[in-house]
Amino acid sequence: MIDILIVDDSSIIRKIFSDHIEKMGYKVVGVAKDGREAIKLYEELRPDLVTMDITMPIMNGIDSLKAIKSKFSDAKVIMITSHGEERLVMEAISSGAKGYVLKPITLENVQQAIYKVFPELATKQ
């Protein structure tokens, strides 16, 4: 089982994502509403994976990703984004993100993104 931290400024998206992740058999160990909170929770919880929205108030997902990766180079982060943010996705990937999921979020898209980060999980299904 992998431990996942969910980061999104929308409480609805956090709930949907949490439900999807738990249905797939993974554990949600924390949720954050902005990048600063994400950094703090990552340091406390050290989850196996972070799902991070790109566009958030206070600190955006890319700046949060960079801060986490600067302290924890082995951190695994999947970015969550809306259509039309391709430039931001490419910046996130070049900053160390392991993949991305486009909104609207589906179980299948989330699972495929997790399998890209943890390919050994795909063989267990």
Image: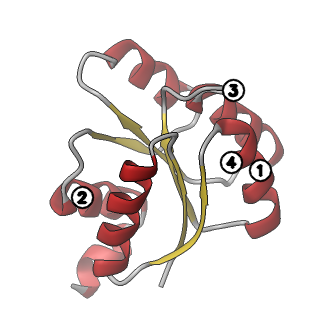
Residue at 44%, 55% in the rendered image: 14
> Label 3 belongs to which residue?
58
* Number of the front mark, 4 or 2: 4
Taking depth in this image into account, of 45 and 95 the one nearest to the observer is 45
Pointer 3 or 1: first along the chain: 3
Distance from the alpha carbon under mark 3 to that under mark 4: 11 Å
Amino acid type, mark 1 = Phe
Where is 10 relative to 74, above or below? above
Horizontal and vertical percent position of residue 107: 20, 63
Element marked by disc 3:
loop
Horizontal placement of 118 versus 109: left or right?
Answer: right
Mark 4–mark 2 CB contact (< 8 Å): no
Q: Please tell me the numbered disc located at residue 112.
A: 2
Which of the pair 118/88 is nearer the observer?
88
Query: SS at mark 1?
Result: loop
Q: Is residue 24 visible?
A: no
Its colouring scheme is: secondary structure
- Mark 1 to mark 2: distance in Å? 24 Å
* Residue at image coords 26%, 74%: 122
The residue at the point 32 percent across, 60 percent down is 16
User: Which quadrant holds residue 124?
Assistant: bottom left
Label 1 neighbour load within 10 Å: few <14, some 14-19, many 20+: few
At 69% from the left edge and 26% from the top edge, which residue is drawn? 58
Query: Could you say where residue 110 lies in the image, as x and y percent from the top left?
Result: 28, 57
- Where does label 1 land, which residue? 72
Q: Which mark is residue 38?
A: 4
Task: Give me the C-alpha separation between circle 2 and circle 3.
Answer: 29 Å
Mark positioned earlier in the residue sequence (2 or 3): 3
Single out the mark in the foreground, 3 or 1: 3
